[in-house]
């Protein structure tokens, strides 16, 4: 019986085989998950219906299971039809989960096209495709080193 919150067998197998610097993408419902991924990445679809599951729920499960050393977000657009004038509300949800779980990291925004490049590396091992409807909810986690 697992003690952490993450109980999905396929995701546990993938992160159990991953190591330091491996990357996990938690993708929102708009992310092109089948075409924007690394050559070694497995895609796990967790998009049951709009809003289930969310990126925040996936983040909470992953943070309970594996040490993370870096958290990058897709920077929002400031012009055009999808523009935002401030951080997406979902980023505050991420910060709240990180604080609750005593994860002392900052969100590091990456420009959209650079984010896609960061995801397509050989270190990318997992994409969790959610059904989150929030804009710019994509989040890229880098696995750290277990210290205890």
Image (spheres, rainbow, N blue to C red):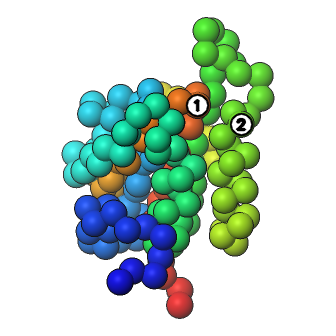
Task: Answer whether labels 2 and 1 touch (C-beta < 8 Å).
Answer: yes
Question: Which residue lies most toward the top here?
Answer: 81
Instruction: From the top left corner, tell me how far across and down residue 115 is, in percent.
Output: 48, 37
Q: Secondary structure at mark 2?
A: helix
- Where residue 147 appears, x then y in whole percent? 53, 86
**Where in the figure is residue 79, as x and y percent of width and height?**
67, 12
What is the CA distance from the residue labelled 2 to the residue labelled 1? 8 Å
Using the image, determine if residue 2 lies above or below residue 123.
below
On screen, residue 46 versus residue 90, left or right, reads: left
**Left or right of 105, for residue 39:** left
In this picture, is 32 found above or below 121?
Answer: above
Q: Secondary structure at mark 1?
A: loop
Q: Quadrant where the N terminus lies?
A: bottom left
Q: Is residue 112 above or below residue 96?
A: above
Which of the two residues, 125 or 94, is positioned nearer the viewer here? Answer: 94
Point out which mark residue 89 bears.
2
Q: Residues within 10 Å of mark 2 (few under 14, many from 20)?
A: few
Residue 52, visible in the rendered structure = yes
Residue at horizontal 44 percent and vertical 36 percent from the top: 131
Q: Nearer the viewer, residue 10 or 76?
A: 10
What residue do we see at 33% from left, 35% from top?
33
Q: Sequence-wise, which precedes: disc 2 or disc 1?
A: 2
Looking at the picture, how far across and down is residue 13, in whole percent? 26, 68
**Could you tell me if residue 74 is visible in this image?**
no
Q: Residue at x 42, y 48 (%)?
A: 25
Q: Is residue 124 left or right of residue 146?
A: left
**Label 1 sits on residue:** 134
* Identity of the residue drawn at 32% across and 68% down: 12
The single residue placed furthest to the right in the displayed view is 86
Residue 24 is tagged as: none
């Amino acid at each position: 019986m697992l003690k952490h919150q993450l109980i999905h067998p396929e995701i546990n197998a993938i992160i159990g085989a991953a190591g330091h610097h491996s990357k996990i993408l938690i993708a929102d419902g708009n992310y092109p998950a089948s075409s924007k991924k690394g050559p070694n990445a497995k895609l796990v679809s967790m998009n049951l219906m709009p809003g289930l599951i969310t990126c925040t729920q996936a983040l909470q499960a992953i943070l309970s299971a594996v040490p993370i050393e870096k958290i990058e977000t897709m920077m929002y657009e400031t012009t055009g039809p999808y523009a935002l004038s401030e951080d997406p509300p979902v980023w505050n949800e991420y910060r709240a989960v990180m604080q609750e779980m005593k994860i002392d990291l900052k969100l590091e925004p990456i420009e959209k096209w650079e984010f896609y490049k960061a995801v397509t590396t050989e270190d990318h091992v997992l994409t969790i495709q959610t059904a989150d409807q929030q804009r710019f909810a994509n989040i890229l986690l880098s696995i750290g080193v277990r210290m205890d």
